[in-house]
Amino acid sequence: MSGVYVLDARSGRIGEVMERLEGRVVLRPVGGGREWDCLPEDVEEAAPAEVLRERVRRLNRDTRSREETVGQEAV
């Protein structure tokens, strides 16, 4: 199941399955970041459109963050 994107029903977050460990599923956010774990019964496969939406959201957030940093350096 590693490499599959799932929806964590508890939090509403989409993550990539990294591994199963001691009865839990370890997930990493789309685009990278801090991993979290949840119970297998709390995950369901994410639709491709949901994964794409999350990737775009992440790219937009990263771009805004970079623009704010550059804007602060100019001041």
Image: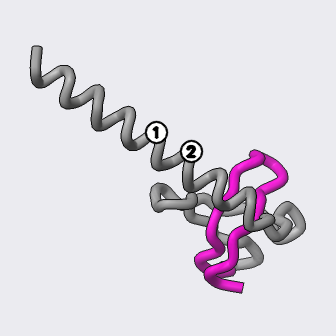
Q: Are marks 1 and 2 in contact (CB under 8 Å)?
A: yes
Left or right of residue 23: residue 17: left
What colouring does the structure picture have? one colour
Instruction: Please name the residue shown 71% across and 72% down the image.
Output: 25
Residue 74 on image: x %, y %: 10, 20
Q: Between 15 and 34, which is closer to the camera in this rendering?
A: 15
Is residue 5 one of those drawn in magenta?
A: yes
**What residue did someone put label 1 on?**
61
- What label sits on residue 57 in the rendered view? 2
Q: Local crowd at mark 2 within 10 Å, few (<14), some, or many (≥20)?
A: few
Q: Quadrant of residue 41?
A: bottom right
Q: Local crowd at mark 1 within 10 Å, few (<14), some, or many (≥20)?
A: few
Q: Between 45 and 22, which is closer to the camera in this rendering?
A: 45
Q: CA distance from mark 1 to mark 2?
A: 6 Å
Q: Which residues are magenta?
A: 1-21
Disc 2 marks which amino acid? Arg
Instruction: Please name the residue shown 55% across and 50% down the image.
Output: 56
Please, which residue is most extreme toward the bottom here? 1
Q: Is residue 17 above or below residue 64?
A: below
